[in-house]
Image (spheres, grey):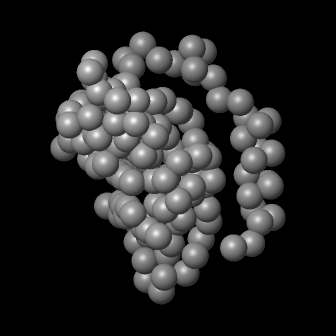
Amino acid sequence: SVRALAQPSFEHTFMSGAADCLKKWQGKDGRFLRSNRDHKAVVNALAVNDDGVLVSGGDDGSLRFWDYETGHCFQKTTTVAQPGSLEAENGIFATAFDLTGSRLITCEADKTVKIWKQDEEASDETNPIDMPAWRKQCIAESKMRY
């Protein structure tokens, strides 16, 4: 079942999040465009900013950062439940970007609201993209039909 939707301000499409994947749809006629399949948990939350960064949050506390246009997952992280919480309480229930689009706000199962900011010192040298693996993944996904 679908648990999350996000629609960017810059094009007439939308993303849906469900059990273990995200799907991109054409807004005009509802035509399916592609799947992003790097999430290993139920996707509860989606948000997209004007820079084309899509964030998905899972019920296991996982956060995935995607390029909205290409579907490339360029960063993965996991939230940490606050001290005194059960390990099962690290799920992400909701996500939103602030008005600048540079800070991510998450609502989590451990009863916290967290504000995440980008690493100002990150660069292509410190966080390189594995282009051969990404191309291989894109080709494999383009051959899959849903």
At a point 53% along the width and 33% down the height, the residue shown is: 75
When the figure is inspected, residue 120 is found, relative to residue 140, above or below; the finding is above
Quadrant of the image occupied by residue 74: top right
| Furthest residue toward bottom | 29
Whether residue 26 appears in this view of the structure is yes
At a point 62% along the width and 65% down the height, the residue shown is: 34
- Image location of residue 113, percent across then percent down: 20, 35
Counting every numbered tag in the picture gives: 0
Q: Which is more toward the observer, 22 or 135? A: 22
Quarter containing the C terminus? bottom right
Say left or right for 32 vs 43.
right
Say left or right for 144 vs 64.
right
When the figure is inspected, residue 135 is found, relative to residue 81, above or below; the finding is below
When the figure is inspected, residue 17 is found, relative to residue 1, above or below; the finding is above
When the figure is inspected, residue 74 is found, relative to residue 35, above or below; the finding is above
Whether residue 70 appears in this view of the structure is no
- Image location of residue 45, percent across then percent down: 36, 52
Q: Which is more toward the observer, 136 or 146? A: 146
At a point 29% along the width and 27% down the height, the residue shown is: 85
Q: Which is more toward the observer, 102 or 55? A: 55
- Image location of residue 140, percent across then percent down: 80, 55
Say left or right for 139 vs 59.
right
Quadrant of the image occupied by residue 108: top left
At a point 24% along the width and 30% down the height, the residue shown is: 115
- Image location of residue 138, percent across then percent down: 73, 51
